[in-house]
Amino acid sequence: MKFLAVSFLVTLSFAARAQSYVIMENGIVVTTDTTGLTYDFGHFAYPQKITLKGGQYFVEDGTVLATIDETGLLFRKYELIPEKILGKGLNYFLSSEGVAYAIDRKGSVKISEFEVFRSAVNFGGTFFTVPRSPGLPALDLYVVTSDGVIQKTELEFQEREIVEFGGTYFMTNRGVLHTVGADGSVHLETASRIGVLQRRGGNYFVDSAGLLYTVTDTGKVMLPALPVSLRLSTVHRFGSNYFIDQAGRLFVVDRWGSIFEKPMRDHDFRQAKVISL
């Protein structure tokens, strides 16, 4: 891997990233905020009408864009949704015409258009790559911040060098894990001996050793304490900041990387129909 000018930034900001949703079979929308709380605010969405989805947004009938803000509130708005989507992530999607739609922490949509985005490849949750020059294997890394700002980093990767694309993290073919902070900073994880990524969510993953890691909004990788009710072998639905086990238990990962079980007596999450990934 070649780095033109690498600087891994350390930040103490707590920018929001982890807001999300799950749509039940009966159309009830349950949302989550960045602190790991869950809500039923009475929103409904017909699962069969969802035409596009990401970590903190979904599109209904190709015309109505619903976004989730950092407090778990859901907003609907009419947007001209492109017919052909080139790629998408947790908080953005790109059209084949180079138009980028980025959703910020407040649920607002920021639209920008750049010719270079037409060539975008390799889409992660909060990042994507673009060939540096036509016909050459070098790729530039772009990140999408929690403020909805798309910015080019100083990192350069070679084609097929990134082999695992997660939500706020990725791994190279040398087994090196990188994380992306909510402010767009990129961090190299060197302290842990992380195995191959086996199961991936937005801000968490399970490696080949069966360990569950979480990624904080500042890009720190953690081995969090697990709820006593959690058995990783029974988890089978993976969302952007939550996962659901076979018994219908919902576990949420907050912006600090902690995991909590979130019982909601009126909802059976075995009936979850639309997951936010």
Image (spheres, helix red, strand yellow):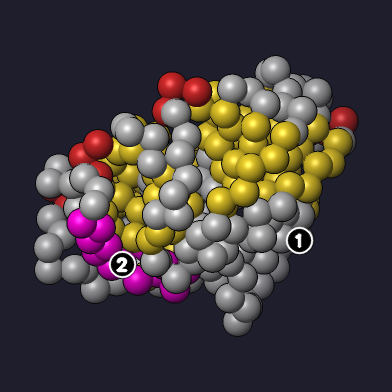
Residue at the spot 47% in from the left edge and 45% down from the top edge: 43
Q: Quadrant of residue 230?
A: bottom left
The span shown in magenta is 253-265
- What is the three-letter code of the residue carrying label 1? Ala
Question: Answer yes or no: do the residues labelled 2 and 1 have beta carbons within 8 Å?
Answer: no
Q: Which mark is residue 189?
A: none
> Looking at the image, can residue 60 be seen?
yes
Question: In the figure, is residue 78 to the left or right of 70?
Answer: right
> Does dot 2 land on a helix, a strand or a loop?
strand
Assess whether residue 55 is covered by the magenta stretch. Answer: no
Q: Is residue 64 left or right of residue 237?
A: right
* Residue at image coords 31%, 67%: 259
Residue 146 position within the rendered picture, expressed as x and y whole percent measured from the top left: 65, 60
Q: Secondary structure at mark 1?
A: loop
> In the picture, which quadrant includes the C terminus?
top left
| Vertical arrangement, residue 57 with respect to residue 230, above or below | above
- Disc 1 marks which residue? 5
Q: Residue furthest front?
A: 42
Count how many numbered circles sit on residues in the image. Answer: 2
Quickly name the residue at label 2.
Answer: 259
- Residue 91 in view: no
**Residue at coordinates 40% horizontally, 50% vertically from top-left?**
30
Q: Amino acid at mark 2?
A: Ile
Label 1 crowd bin: few (<14), some (14–19), many (20+), radius 10 Å: few
